Image (cartoon, rainbow, N blue to C red):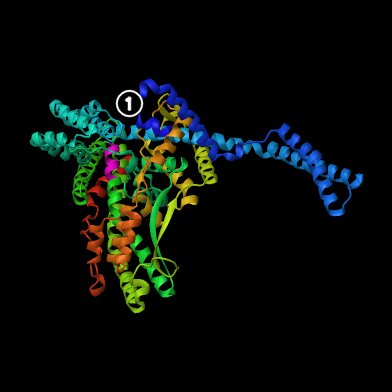
Amino acid sequence: MIRWFFLNRKNKDRANHRARVSLDREGNEQIERISRVVHRVHWMRNLLSIMWTAGPVTLLGLYGGFFLAYGKPPPMQTLVYFFFFTVLSGLIAFLAKVVYDMTRGHVKEQAQQDVSEAIDKLADLILAVRDLIVESFEEEARQREAALQLLRRIELTPDGVAFAAQELTGDGELSKILGRIETYRRAGLYSRVRDLNRQHRERIEGALQWLNEVSPEAASVLRERFSGEAPQLEKGVPRDEFFIERVLAAIEEDNLLLMTLQDVEEMLILVFELINGREIPMLIFSYSGQWKLAQALDELEECRSHYRIAQASGGNRMRALAGFLVETDEATHEQLPNGLSAQELIQRIEEIMDQLAGEVLQLARQSRYRTLPSLTPLRTKADVLGKSLNLYKAARQGYQQLGKAHASLLHASDAWNELAERFGDFASQLRLGPGRSGLRILEKVVSLSDEQKVAVCQHLVAYLQGEQMEKRGRRFFTRRDGRSRPLTLEGARQLAVEVALALEPHIQLSRPAIQRGLNATNATYLGGLEPDMSAAEKAALGAAMAREVQQDMRHAAERLAVALVKHYRVDLTEEARDFLIDAYGARPQMLDMLSNYEASNTNNPVSFLSLRPAVVVAPKREWYKALIKARQELGK
């Protein structure tokens, strides 16, 4: 019924009531399945079962068994003994069940309520965070971000696509062309899509080139729409890479500014899809056999994980600084759009920091000569400058750690290569078929059991109730110091931290292998969430979307093959190549290229630095000088 509902959205008006009933029913079944312990057996049924067992069943069984064994009916005393034995045993079990229900039954009922409340509030919080993301933009950029979110919706009509394009480009005629392209795409007439694309190529490219300067991400999505490509339900939605690493870094360093609002949304989507039954497949590899080889492989994998984290750390922290400057209105989204290269982003941030330091210094001088009416502007600017300096230093430190991680990785790689050559085929080939020794690919599924889902929901509900976070109308509010306030950026980030803490005991988010596996998969599409849905409808939608996502292992298999051949010097045999193609759908062209890579014949150390790290200069003296002057004035 759920699949029918999503495949026939065009009949929504006529079948809305029937679909809503179906969603409620299947959503309640989802909640009850997670909390199976809530089901109880009726007392009357228990009593009847005891009497039936103690009466006819016991008497017939005892009489028949005794007669077959001894050839005569059992004595009356024996019949009475077994009758009362069965009755008393059943009554004791019945009383134990009653006592248990009186003492622990309410806990199980509460589990059902917690699951329902968690699903309901998580869905609303996903929508609330999306609104916060859009709200954090200036008016013109907010218009573009809202249009970008519309273009990512699967069920968007041709008129909706045209409207979003007009919001992005301001070109009404070009928007009508995109609406026609979307109509032909829905009809499967891709030849007409290509015709329109060819006829209006110059106009399209001009609009995309202009849009790319202010929002590269929006330009990329719009280009796909003009090419006749649209989001697909079964493919899911690409995750924001390294979002888990940023959230964990914020926890470790006690600095919520290290994560962005997009990271908050990704964490909420992850826990929502896991609670609703999403099973996320991933590929890992392990070695068993020679202990030296096993130790060398573990060390190489650990060094490679540290290197990848260090590689992302500097860029992630610089991105967090860019987000903070935009949130505090010290920069605009046009100045720091998504999609900039690391070096260009750093250059623009340096210019903004120079400007901010100059403004702080100017306010400090006005305060010194008593021409500043209030110290509030100075205090605000100085606070922003201080936090920006801390984020800048953290980003610079992250880039500096990259060189050290690269040196450690090269050392571990040399140790592995030396042992692999010494032991031969034990390490130079993938092992297939029966047996455990050698280097093998393992499949792992990240999911939550029913008991784990209840535990995660109870953790989140306890936090939400402790924060007194509740929905009023279409917005979330928290109560602090007796006053009710709307959900803030800091509150949203703290919520992502709680989600990570709730999931960590069950799926080990802190493990690098888990982080890489999740980054290689797509998230569940949740564009169908609506604010006025019931908890049962949200649960049904989440479960249906989790089932729809294809378990595509192609990219994971190709990434794993690249790592094994280029980083671990493993020979990709014909048998291993066929296995990756047949089992996971890897592209033969990619594997052929890897097969021709003769890593085992070179003795030169391999550099893992594919690109030169961005250069981050030390914080400028002018920034510190402005901050010191401001604090001197504020301290008077």
Q: Say which amino acid is labelled 1.
A: Lys
Q: From this view, report whether residue 598 is shown above or below residue 381.
A: below
Q: Position of residue 125 (x, y in %)?
A: 41, 34
Which quadrant holds residue 201?
Answer: top left
Please report the bounds of the magenta region as a residue range.
321-328
Task: Please identify the quadrant where the C terminus is shown.
Answer: top left
* Point 38% across, 73% down: residue: 426
* Percent of width and height locating residue 231: 28, 38
Dominant SS of magenta comes to helix
Q: Position of residue 58 (x, y in %)?
A: 80, 43
- Kindly identify which residue carries mark 1: 10
Element assignment for label 1? helix
| Label 1 Cα neighbours within 10 Å, binned few <14 / some 14-19 / many ≥20 | few
Q: Is residue 335 visible?
A: no
Q: Identify the residue shown where x is 25% and y is 58%.
A: 588
Q: Quadrant of residue 56?
A: top right
255 shown above or below 165:
below
Q: Nearer the viewer, residue 70 or 438?
A: 70
From the viewer's perspective, tell me whether residue 360 is left or right of residue 492: left
Whether residue 106 is situated above or below residue 297 in the rendered picture = above
Q: Measured from the top left, where is residue 91 in percent x and y?
A: 78, 40
